[in-house]
Amino acid sequence: MKQNLAAKLGKGLSPRQFVENMTKNQQAFESWYEAFSWQDEDDKAYFESLNHRDDLRCLILAADWCGDVVRNVPAVFRILETAGIRTEVLILEENQDVMDDYLTMGGRAVPIVIIVDTGGYPLGSWGPRPRRVQKLMEEFKRENPDREAPEYETKIAGVRTAMGQAYGEGTEYQSVIAKELRELISGL
């Protein structure tokens, strides 16, 4: 069972504070944020309809050095802004206790978007990347469990390239994030 996160509510950084405090990748992060656009009006309308709810909060485990954070969190910020869901960022290195509840295949991968109620009870989570991209890493780790194997580094470089291709060139993946977050929240 995941820990109650009430003690973390109000302790994280606002989205703006997170961006302002970035020491790495700030320009790329802001570029992805500015590039966001709604590609599905139904998704936009759904998230706009959440503005009438005051029972959801969002905590995002993140680190500015992580490429998936730089790519995915700007879209998450824009989606949650549209929804009017209060959002805070918890820095990975300062919140290992929370991270340990949201491991990905036994490892620490960010971002992790955690939806909680006003009492801090976790309702669901998303991350660290869209399912179609994550699937590539899951397959890689199943096929390459030994991180000390001589060809591990070469192989992981190849899967990272494939993951970049799965994201695509433009912002279409942001629509995928919106759909996955919609699926998560509508199921709560």
Image: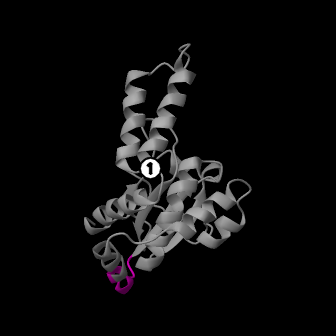
Residue type pointed to by label 1: Gly
Is residue 166 depicted above or below 3 in this figure? Answer: above
Name the residue nearer the viewer: 177 or 158.
158
For residue 40, side relative to residue 156 (left or right):
left
For residue 74, side relative to residue 38 (left or right):
right
* Residue 121 among magenta residues: no
* Residue bearing the label numbered 1: 168
Q: Could you tell me residue 23's position as x and y percent?
A: 74, 56
In which quarter of the view is residue 105 placed? top left
Name the residue nearer the viewer: 9 or 173.
173
Is residue 103 depicted above or below 59 in this figure? Answer: above
For residue 60, side relative to residue 1 (left or right):
right
Number of other residues with Cα within 10 Å of mark 1, as a class: few under 14, some 14 to 19, many 20 or more: few
Q: Which residue is rendered at x = 35% and y = 47% of the image? A: 131
Mark 1 lies on a secondary structure that is loop
Residue 123 in sight here: no
Q: What stretch is highlighted in magenta?
A: 49-55
Q: Could you tell me residue 170's position as x and y percent?
A: 47, 57
Colouring mode (rainbow / by chain / secondary structure / one colour): one colour
* Residue extending furthest toward the top: 150
Q: Which residue is rendered at x = 45% and y = 36% of the image? A: 162
Residue 73 in sight here: yes
Q: Which residue is rendered at x = 58% and y = 72% of the image? A: 10
Q: Could you tell me residue 161's position as x and y percent?
A: 50, 36
* Residue extending furthest toward the front: 169
* Residue extending furthest toward the bottom: 52
Counting labels gives: 1
Name the residue nearer the viewer: 83 or 26.
26
